[in-house]
Image (cartoon, rainbow, N blue to C red):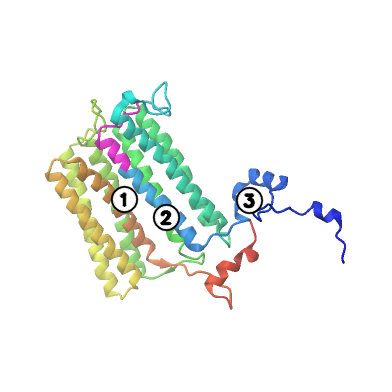
């Protein structure tokens, strides 16, 4: 019967009753020094898990926009009159602050949920094998946008809902939505060089549409900043522009985007483009029609709060749809290992890539 060297047992981890090895002191130190690398060395998520993790910040960004709109439309913008505390004496809302305090504080708490969603996306991207630095960087970019926008949100409260800071707050959220959508798309692609699916003239047409759509979003914040929904029952200053004029300019930009989308669909059909760009263009056109209908109804019905909230939700969907059209114009095939199907490659890439 072979003997066991007692010195070897010192270096072995004794399993617990559940079969899980004990965490050594070295493991604990490694987890503290670089928790992402510690997790990545011990966990390889399925590609679908990474995709769902990247989708979470998109969903939460849209929810933040909708709940932020609810804060504004219910006049709860100063429900918590200071920041980072809710009041000078309380971190949370108090019973004396009533409904408005609950709405404003609840929206603040959703920022932590958004941070958790972005953190989950970063962890999943960092743990994917093989390691994809571009995905991790997109996750960290979202994190810093969230942090800066949280500070900007505090400034909005401290300056009494200044309409320019409110507009900047929404634009920053749109930037977060852009990064999240890009990361979600990249989780479903490889890291090879992008291959265009359409000609240069079509790409230029789409870029014009993207620029006009971005301008549409910015002008929409001016419409809101000049409109009647100031976010609080007190006398909040509005942007010194003619609301009727800026609303009509917003409508003109919307019609330009619709026209460009319609033209793009015909061009894609004429050049026999792949199904991907055609499907994304069709989706954008349908979203634009719904958003336009809501916009005109709210304009002619004196901006009821429910329709304004739906219009804010629609603006997120429009921007996401525009980005998806842009990203559908190229493809990045996944890299494969000769002799291995792509699913096997995902499963065996841990040993091939190793932790980083």
Q: Which residue is mark 2?
A: 55
Secondary-structure class at tag 1:
helix
The tag earlier along the polypeptide, 2 or 1, is 2
Q: Nearer the viewer, residue 280 or 115?
A: 115
At which x and y percent is residue 87? 39, 24
Q: CA distance from mark 3 to mark 2?
A: 24 Å
Residue at image position (70%, 54%) is 15
Quarter of the image with the C terminus is bottom right
Q: Which residue is mark 3?
A: 38
Residue 183 shows up from this direction: no
Q: Residues within 10 Å of mark 1 (few under 14, many from 20)?
A: many
The tag earlier along the polypeptide, 1 or 3, is 3
Q: How many marks?
A: 3
Secondary-structure class at tag 3:
helix
Q: Residue furthest left?
A: 300
Find out whether the residues at labels 2 and 1 contact each other: C-beta distance under 8 Å. Answer: no
Q: Residues within 10 Å of mark 3 (few under 14, many from 20)?
A: some
**Direction from residue 167 to residue 138 in the image, left or right:** right
Instruction: Please identify, in this view, whether the residue under mark 1 or under mark 3 is nearer the observer.
Output: 3
Secondary-structure class at tag 2:
helix
The tag earlier along the polypeptide, 3 or 2, is 3
The boundaries of the magenta stretch are 67-81
At which x and y percent is residue 35? 61, 47
Find out whether the residues at labels 3 and 2 contact each other: C-beta distance under 8 Å. Answer: no
Relative vertical location of residue 46 with respect to residue 27 in this rendering, above or below: below
Q: Which residue is mark 1?
A: 316
Instruction: Please identify, in this view, whether the residue under mark 2 or under mark 1 is nearer the observer.
Output: 2
At which x and y percent is residue 64? 35, 43
Q: Residue furthest top?
A: 89
């Amino acid at each position: 019967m072979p003997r066991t060297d007692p010195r070897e047992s010192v270096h072995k981890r004794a399993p617990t009753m559940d079969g899980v090895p004990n965490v050594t002191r070295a493991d604990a130190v490694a987890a503290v020094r670089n928790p992402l690398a510690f997790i990545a060395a011990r966990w390889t998520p399925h590609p679908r898990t990474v995709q769902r993790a990247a989708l979470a910040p998109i969903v939460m960004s849209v929810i933040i926009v909708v709940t932020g709109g609810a804060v504004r439309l219910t006049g709860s913008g100063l429900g918590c009159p200071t920041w980072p505390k809710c009041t000078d004496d309380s971190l949370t809302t108090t019973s004396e602050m009533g409904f408005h305090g609950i709405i404003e504080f609840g929206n603040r708490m959703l920022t932590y949920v958004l941070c958790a969603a972005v953190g989950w996306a970063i962890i999943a991207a960092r743990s994917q094998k093989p390691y994809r630095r571009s995905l991790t960087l997109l996750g960290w970019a979202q994190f810093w946008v969230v942090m800066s926008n949280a500070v900007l949100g505090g400034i909005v409260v401290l300056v009494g809902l200044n309409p320019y800071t409110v507009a900047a707050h929404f634009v920053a959220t749109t930037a977060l939505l852009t990064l999240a959508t890009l990361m979600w798309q990249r989780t479903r692609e490889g890291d090879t060089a992008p291959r265009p699916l359409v000609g240069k003239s079509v790409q230029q047409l789409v870029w014009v549409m993207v620029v006009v759509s971005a301008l549409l979003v910015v002008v929409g914040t001016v419409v809101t900043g000049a409109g009647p929904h100031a976010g609080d029952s007190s006398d909040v200053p509005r942007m010194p522009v003619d609301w009727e004029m800026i609303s009509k300019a917003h409508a003109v930009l919307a019609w330009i985007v619709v026209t460009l989308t319609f033209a793009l669909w015909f061009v894609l059909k004429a050049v026999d483009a792949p199904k991907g760009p055609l499907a994304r263009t069709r989706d954008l056109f349908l979203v634009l029609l719904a958003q336009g209908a809501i916009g005109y109804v709210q304009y002619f019905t004196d901006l009821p709060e429910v329709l304004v909230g739906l219009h804010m939700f629609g603006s997120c969907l429009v921007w996401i749809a525009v980005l998806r059209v842009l990203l559908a114009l190229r493809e990045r095939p996944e890299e494969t290992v000769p002799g291995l199907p792509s699913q096997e490659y995902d499963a065996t890439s841990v040993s091939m890539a190793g932790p980083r």
